[in-house]
Amino acid sequence: MNEPRRRRTEAPFRELFDIDAMRAELSALAEGLFSGDKPGNEIALRSAVAKRLKLAYGEGHKVAEKWLMADGSGRRCAERLSRLQDEIIQLVHELVVKYLYPVDNPSTAERMAIVAVGGYGRGLMAPGSDTDILFLLPYKQTAWGESVAESILYVLWDMGLKVGHATRSVDECIRQARGDMTIRTSLLEARLLLGELALFDELIRRFDAEVVEGTAAEFVTAKLTEREDRHKRAGASRYLVEPNVKDGKGGLRDLHTLFWIAKYVYRVRETRDLVAKGVFTPEEATLFRRCESFLWSVRCHLHFLAGKAEERLSFDLQREMAERLGYVEHPGLKDVERFMKHYFLVAKDVGDLTAIVSSALEERHDKPVPRLNRMIARLRRSPNRQLKESPDFIVDHDRINVADAGAFERDPVNLIRIFHYAGKKGLAFHPDAMRLATRSLKLIDAGVRDNPEANRLFLDILTARDTAEIVLRRMNETGVLGRFVPEFGKIVAMMQFNMYHSYTVDEHLIRAIGVLAEIDRGDRPEYGIANELIHQIKNRQLLYVAVFLHDIAKGRPEDHSVAGARVARKLCPRFGLSAADTETVAWLIEEHLVMSTIAQSRDLSDRKTIENFGAVVQNLERMKLLLILTTADIRAVGPGVWNNWKSQLLRTLFYETEPVVTGGFSDSNRNQRVGRAQAEFRAAMSGTAGPGASSAWEPEALERYIDRLYPSYWLRVDLEHKVEHANFILAAEAQGRALATASRTDPKRGITELTVFAPDHPKLLAVIAGACAAAGANIVDAQISTTTDGRALDTISLTRAFEQDSDEIRRADRIALAIEKSLSGEIRLPEVVAKKIPKRPRAFTVEPEVTLNNSWSNRHTVVEVAGLDRPGLLYGLTQTLSRLNLNIASAHVATFGERVVDVFYVTDLLGAKIIGAARHSAIRRALLQVLDADDETNAGAMPDASPAA
């Protein structure tokens, strides 16, 4: 028998698991069960051993966690946990072959090697990792081998371990490894735990000779394809703010894939061996180990914290993870944001290491040459050619490369030039050139930053319609972008601890440039009016610069919009912008949130709203620029944030304000736009019939319907919803229904829409919100409309609860039924809401704010409520306003991740504004009490009689 390999650990391992003491204890237990002439009790032994080892295993994990908190080394923790597993398997095996299935003189067939494979074979285990073992036999399965393997597995399973296992002969291993890439990869990591060394050596020798030999290209292609598929499942960007530590881009599995490839192609066993092979420099090998150590620390802490094999760094875990890992708050950056910035920088380093190994494989012809779009495609190999514009660069298989290692040192501006040429000519980047660029970052000094040609080239890169996003991203990945624009370097890998932004700040800015380029090309109709306005602006360069810089000052103590304007005033002259253009860029950055805020949370039919916005933008050119920037900003926040509804709101705000800033504000101008919207609607409705409607719209009926809706409806609602509303109302009235509901799913936005058509009354919105809350549905948007004949037409957007549309529609139908029962008095919402609102811990804190303002509207008091979103919040707010004897004229619901901003235009019961400081204070206190309701205990428990519900 061969002893399992021991790995060095700094703490005395006996404190974690004392194998000798445990062996003596288990042997005594077995002797007691098998002593004398008593028949052997196999089940009793297995049960007793599993129970004792499960206890020791749990205690060992507690010690491992304590040591992890003390020394901070995730890799050492993973080694300790792997050794714990090794020694447990060794003890179980000893007991099984000594007491249950002893063989005095084993035949050749009654020999076995127990082998750790896969991740366990590396000798590294996270607290929640699976245990993958191979029972290796010399020939086919025997009764003895089957019994031994089965007994060992029963004990491990009874301990509650997740065990992946296989029992195979050497011949079977080789045959299956040839046909199955997963088995081949797991055997690549094989490590003998105990048993026959000769058998294990035979497996390794034959695996190398009969499986690995001559198949490097096949293995590399399979692993890289598997990596791409995994990234698609986990999220294609390495800068997602809730990353998957194991399977995400830049995560541990990427490092494992690199090492699998290295072991397979170069036949090495340690990272340092890749230096001798010329793949890594000593510094890059050190970087590999540093990345691996950090990711193992994160993964081990994450498993311990979650109490299970949790691989996703979700928001509710990130803050405590930051504390466990020792991060502290700095001015402008929370502890959790500093932790996540470190995480994303490591993920970027993993990407750099991937590019280095890929380059080395291409030199060996073991990896297909990629094109600019990074899709793996084999190309006909062609000779290199010099770039005619510069002798410092060559084109190698449609990829730009340096002519020699001194290209950047001879002229540091070449560090910008190489990206300019790549974008201009549509070339991909050779990994060797990118590697050299990263090593040459110190050449980018003040002289290069102030160099007029370097800045001209950068501005060309930034404003290129077809290649700006991909080239900027490569500049960022190499570090050139952050070095050339140090202000950008400060926000590289910076995450914002909120649910609104899906990406880090640098990735958001680069994506925003990509969206702006799409608007510029005009190939995405969903960007609405921005597609038209971009061809009317006077200077597209300043717009690109403003988009690039709009969040450049995130992470500073002061308001990032104000600080960003200050940065722009410094950078724009360097980029070659005039004084006037610089001031416009600074203004756009300082006001870049204003248009989005007003469009989503103000009554756009209120003249005062439009006049106030007009006073901010002052002229038409600025408003055009601001609308395009706002569109790019919202779209680049994350998937599903931009939609037709927001596009229509921006369009309405623009056209409502245009006459104000051009001096031509008049009712006739507005009437013309209403008329155009109605004409567009008539054209869309010609010959259509809604679901359940008895017939298509007759011209007279269509005109009567148009007259029932106020002008603000025609300007505010997008055409798709107008058509749906019309057919929905036609069907409802054809069936004689006073109250009707309709629902539909929107997979792109990840929401479900519920439309309600009912007699209007002051508490209707509260009833709808309460019914949604009772179903545990969270309202993220609401479109509130009324008709001239006293009906309400409300469209509510809810976060999805189910993956399947059919399940979502059933949930929406239940909510609709609850609304009908509430309106008819069959159910009392306060009690139902209090019982059914789900309780959940808060991962975020949002400072609650309540603002009452009489200057934002000529006719109403505007109540703005901002705070942490949760199911039932809108119900609590609307109920409270009703109990305070306030009439809600219009409501505007907007959510920004975990932060909600609800704005209500209210009057007293006589239709007047709310006057008096005491009255304002009472309203503010009551609403703050709703916002402060503890999510864990009484989120929905709104008292039925108290105005401070």
Image: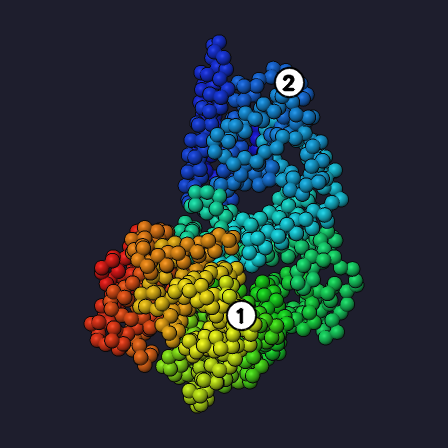
Of residues 525 and 784, which is closer to you in this image?
784
For marks 2 and 1, give the CA distance: 88 Å
Image quadrant in which the N terminus is located: top right
Q: Residues within 10 Å of mark 1 (few under 14, many from 20)?
A: some
Residue 696 numbered mark, or none: 1
Task: Name the image colouring.
Answer: rainbow
Of residues 264 and 695, which is closer to you in this image?
695
Instruction: Give the residue number, with chain letter if any, for mark 2.
Output: 106
Marked residue nearer the N-terminal end (2 or 1)? 2
Q: Position of residue 147 (x, y in %)?
A: 58, 23
Residue at 42% x, 75% y: name it: 709
Q: Residues within 10 Å of mark 2 (few under 14, many from 20)?
A: few
Q: Which amino acid type corresponds to the residue marked 2 in the rendered image?
A: Pro
Q: Position of residue 72 (x, y in %)?
A: 45, 47
Of all residues shown, which one is farthest toward the bottom? 663
Q: Position of residue 945 (x, y in %)?
A: 22, 59
Residue 199 lies left or right of residue 306; in this view the side is right
Residue at 65% x, 51% y: name it: 224
Q: Secondary structure at mark 1?
A: loop
Q: Which amino acid type corresponds to the residue marked 1 in the rendered image?
A: Ala
Q: Position of residue 630 (x, y in %)?
A: 48, 73
Closer mark to the observer between disc 2 and disc 1: 1
Tell me if residue 825 comes above or below residue 298 in the rendering: below
